[in-house]
Amino acid sequence: MPDRLSAVDASFLYLEDYTTPMHVGGVAVFRRPRSGFDYEHLLSMVDRRLGLVPRYRQRVMEVPGSLARPVWVDDQDFDLTYHVRRSALPKPGNDDQLHDLVARLMSRKLDHTRPLWELYLVEGLSRNRVAIITKTHQAMIDGIGAIDIGQVIFDVQRNREIEDPDALWMPRPAPTVTQLLVEAATDVVQRPGEIVENARAAMVDASATVQKVTRALGGVASAVRAAVVPAPSGPLNAPTSTQRRFAVAKAKLDDLRAVRRAHGSTVNDVVLAVVAGALRNWLLSRGEVVTPSTTLRAMVPVSVRSDDAEADAAYQDTASLPVGSAGNKVSAYLVDLPVGEGNPTMRLHQVSHAMRAHAESGQSVAADALVKVSGFAPPTLHALGARVANQFSDRLFNVLVTNVPGPQVPLYAAGARMMEMFPVVPLAKNQSLSVGVTSYNGAVYFGLNADRDAMPDVGVLAAMIGEAVDEMIGTVDA
C-alpha cells in the first residue's frame, strides 16, 4: 500500500499557487578543490546517495474523485538529470549575480507530476567558487520519512564514499485506479469524516483549505488566533507577487556569543534584536513613521541549545548526521520586535524579556503543540518555520524569522569544502519578507527572501543587518 500524505503535508499542495510556491531552499557556496568539481561529479554523488532518501524518487498521485488524500508512488520515468541541473553565471560571476539567480529559481513552482525537488550546480562564480542551490517542497518534509536533499550530499569527511543501498533500484508499479479507490474506501470506513475533508481540500478554495488545516491541528491554530491581537499593519504585509528578490548578510558567531554573555541573553535573542534593529533603520529609510512604541510581529520557530559547551558537544556528536538532525528542542513563538526602541541594549533586553515570557506562558504550549501536530522532527527546521507560518493567518505576524544552529565543523560535497550556507525560507500569503538564519563553522548566515514588488530595497535591509550586528557588538564594551 503506498504511503498517503498526511493532512498537513497535503495541505501544502492545496494551498500552493503561483504567488506562494511551497518549497524551502538553500544556497551553499564551495571552494573548488584542485581535483576539480563539476556537474558530473555532483550527478554521480547524488546518484550514489539517493537511496538514502527514497522519497526523492517518488511523486504525488491523486486519488480519483478526491476520495482520499494523495499517495506517494515511485516515479516510473525518474530522470536524475531533470532534478540535478547546471547553470553558470556570466563574468564577473559575483555574489549579486548569484543572488539574482537564486531569486529567479525560487520564484518558480516545482512540477507536481515529478518528484518534488530540484538541485542546481552554479558554475562561473569568481574566486574559484561554485554554488549548489536546493529546492524541496514542504509536502516532502514530513520530519521522519524525508529530509532535504542538501543534507544528503554534505559530509564531514572530504572524500567519504557512500554507496546507494538501492543501486539497482527498480520502481514499484503504480497502484491502479481500482486499488486507489479500494484503499480510499478502507480509509473512509476507518475515518468517515475524511471524505468530506478531502473533497473540500481538492477545491481551489482558500477558506475551505484553511478550515481543513485548522481542524487537522485540533483547534490549536484557532486557539492561538483567539489569544493574539492582529499584527501591526505596514509594508511587510503587501499582496504577494510571483517574483522574488534574495539578499544575504553574515556575522561571526563568537561576536554574537560575546553579546549574549555580556547581557545574559541567548544567541537567538541577539539575532532577533539584530533583525529588529535592521528593520527599524529600514523603515526609517523608507520614510515610515517610527515611534518609541512601534513594533513588528515576528513568527519565530527556533531550535534551542542550552549553552556553548553543550552545543559544541552536540555538534561533534552529530557531525556525521544531516545538518540539524538531532539534539534539538523546537519552539515557535509570536514575538513583537521593538523596532521603535533606538537603544540597542534596551532593544535586546526587551526581546529577551519577550522570549522568556513566552517560555513561561501557556501560549508556548499551544505553539509547541502546533509543531508536534505538523509531524515535524528536527532534520529541516527552516521547513518547520515555513510550515508553521503558512498555517497561521497573515494578519497575525509581519515577518517570519527562522534560526537554525548548524554544525560547527567544515562540511564537504564531493571533495569541495563548503564556505557559506544561506537558507531560503518561502513567503506565506501576503507576506513580503522571510529571514532564514543558520550558524555554520563559526559564522552566522542570514538569507532574506523577499517579494520583488513589495521589497525592491531588500539589499538595503541586508546591509542594515550588518550595521545592526556592529551596533550590538558595540554594546559589549560600552
Image (cartoon, helix red, strand yellow):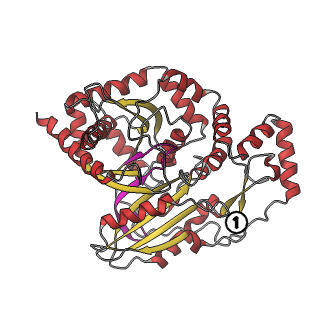
Looking at the rendered structure, the kind of residue marked 1 is Asp
Residue 431 belongs to the span the image colors magenta = yes
Relative height, residue 209 to residue 351 (above, below): below
Q: Position of residue 196 (x, y in %)?
A: 79, 37
Helix, strand or loop: magenta stretch: strand
- Taking the image as shown, residue 130 lies to the left or right of residue 138, namely left
Secondary structure of the residue carrying numbered label 1? loop
- State the count of labels: 1
To which residue does mark 1 refer? 75
Q: Position of residue 216 (x, y in %)?
A: 67, 34
- Taking the image as shown, residue 276 lies to the left or right of residue 59, namely left
Q: Nearer the viewer, residue 450 or 95?
A: 450
Q: Which of 407 and 380 is in front in this view?
A: 380
Q: Position of residue 320 (x, y in %)?
A: 45, 56
In this view of the protein, can residue 442 be seen by the observer? Answer: no
Q: In which quarter of the image is residue 123?
A: bottom left
Residue in view at x 47 percent, y 33 percent: 331
Q: Nearer the viewer, residue 111 or 17?
A: 17
| Residue at the left extreme of this rendering | 478
Q: How crowded is mark 1: few (under 14 residues within 10 Å), some or many (20 or more)?
A: many
Residue in view at x 34 percent, y 55 percent: 247
Q: Where is residue 81 in the image (x, y as percent from the top left)?
A: 57, 74
Residue 314 belongs to the span the image colors magenta = no
Image quadrant occupied by the C terminus:
top left
What residue span does the magenta drawing correspond to? 412-437
In this view of the protein, can residue 313 be seen by the observer? Answer: yes
